[in-house]
Amino acid sequence: MKTILIIFLILFSFGFVAAQNTDSKSDEGVKTELSEISRLSIGGYGQIDFNLPLHEEMRHNATLDVHRMVLLFGYQFSEQTSFLTEIEMEHVSEVYVEQAYLNHRFFPWLNLKAGLMLIPMGIINEFHESSAFHGVERPNIDNRLVPTTWREIGVGFHGNILPIQTKYQVYVVNGFKSYDGGGTIRGIDGLRKGRQKGAESIASHPNVSAKVDYYGISGLTIGLSAYSGKTQSNLYNGLADDNLNALAEADSSVISLTMVGFDARYRIGGFELRGQFISTILSNTQAYNALTGKDLGSRMQGYYMEAAYNVFRHFPSYSHELIPFIRYEQYDTHAATEGSLIRNNAYNHTEITMGLDYKLTQNAVLKADYQILKAKGVEDQFQFNMGVAIAF
Amino acid sequence: MKSQIIIWVLLFASLTGLSQTKTDDIPSNALKMIEKARAGKSFKILQFYPERTKYPDLGYSKCYTINNQDEKPAYLILASAKGRTELFDFAVLYDTALVITEVKVLVYRSAYGGEISSGRWLRQFKGYFSGKSLEYGKDIDAISGASFSGSSITLGISKLSRQLSLYTSE
């Protein structure tokens, strides 16, 4: 708890010093009348999906789902200070606040962000609008390894250092909840069920999240992300300092984790190439699994590679885009296990997604794709998907 | 150190002496664009006000002519455009033939999409003249993580250029 306080104090004092030094000359706006009339912004994004599992000898229902419909509101209080929120309706009826943060710009290279924010890890978690990725569904790595849309409450700094064409983000955020009357995180989908999403979230250990993006080579953006900390557990709540047995039990309910990510996006001509690698090391899983009866692995790892090409680029008079794409994913949520826990091969996935995006505009897309989903020792699965994706 | 100060004072004095319009309204990084383009030659700046009903985008921007005596004027436009949620400000400098010589993002406010401020990416607009097509993703390379701001500045510059060419041909 002390460390949290100290980190917050340092963050705030740094922010205060920076505020004193703000040099108005370095940050001159144009101040047209437009700036007065467009303080409030309304936007949103959505995806409406059709999913049909295909099986030679068995019939399956298709599902039709308004998977996500998100409304975005932004308000610019002043030249430096703004607020942004995204309100999400998932599967029509589940309501979440996906982002809600205050941003204050001291300099282009130093901004303070505080509130419910996206964890910068890989590509999709931050750029999760359905028109920003190929295919109907997000890559599965960005579901099982990076639990998108991953967001927690926190505070920190970010900025754009133009001379070296580098962006950075560094935040202190709340972590996953691994124990709430029982274990929440597990082998099949890793940390996904531990997300607290800023909803009456509990805090016992602060976590740190950071990302650096370099965009200095034409068409290329590369990112390096890191996340480190301990999970949160409600077993610490109301625990006496001298109750050593209970303290030991509480310690068993906590996982230390470090996640690193490397991602690259490259565009040249009509080509777009993307790749992402994610590795998560978890420690204390043996004690955690013994306490909770879960099967959490001690390492989760995977990558994907994707290539896409805009065929209509050769027709200058045609403003639509027709983009065939293919994505190869390999990931394992049991890349390693601790103690007596045997690696479950069914958690070792190899998946191929191929399909077509038809972009009516940059942010209004019709999609169709076919997925081959393989896991070791499990019958191969096939799925056909279609969808509508928009962002505004 | 002293000589540096003197040079700066002289530079500043020469600038204030020459400009006709209040250059206080022009952000210093936009003024630097003009100085660079004029390569040491003197100039005067005059603001003009296109009618909003006729020139909807140009009319909401700040428009200046840059010239000296009988020369044909060059143009500087200071405008704002919207990314996903927040406005950003940019400057477009045209030569006497209305060809873009430089584009600069003066202030970028949002937490996302700041990549468009990169000089390397903005260099793509150099040499563009009104009448040529200007489509994001085709004529101007798309930029990862900045699709809203990237298409917005592309559309903005395209419209401003068309309206400036109409205005000057009147």
Image (cartoon, rainbow, N blue to C red):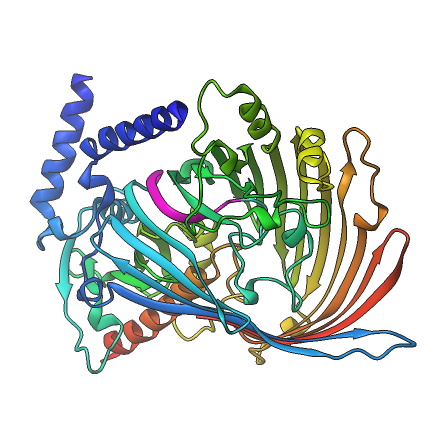
Q: Nearer the viewer, residue A84 or B134?
A: A84
At 59% from the left edge and 46% from the top edge, which residue is drawn? A122
The answer to whether residue A152 is visible is yes
**Dominant secondary structure (helix, strand or loop) of the stretch shown in magenta:** strand
Query: To which quarter of the image does residue A379 belong?
Result: bottom right
Q: How far from the left and from the top, in percent, is residue A59?
A: 84, 80
Q: Residue B45: percent from the left, percent from the top?
A: 15, 56
Write the residue at 9% across / 55% down: B21
**Horizontal side of residue A120 vs B105, given as left or right:** right
Left or right position of B83 against A82: right
Observer able to see residue B69? no
- Closer to the camera in the image, B116 or A172: A172
Q: Residue at x 22, y 66 (%)?
A: A34
* Left or right for A39, reference A375: left
Return the x and y of residue A51 as percentages of the image width and height.
70, 74
Of residues B122 and A215, the one drawn nearer to the viewer in this rendering: A215
Magenta span has A221? no
Q: Is residue B66 left or right of residue A139?
A: left
Instruction: Tell me the quadrant of the picture where the C terminus of chain B can be found.
Output: bottom left
Start and end of the magenta stretch? Answer: A109-120
User: Image quarter for residue A36?
Assistant: bottom left
Give me the residue at 56% from left, 30% from top. A250
In the image, B3 versus A373, the foreground residue is A373
* x, y percent for residue B133: 47, 73
B147, above or below A167, in the image: below
In what quadrant of the picture does the N terminus of chain B appear? top left
B152 vs A237: above or below: below
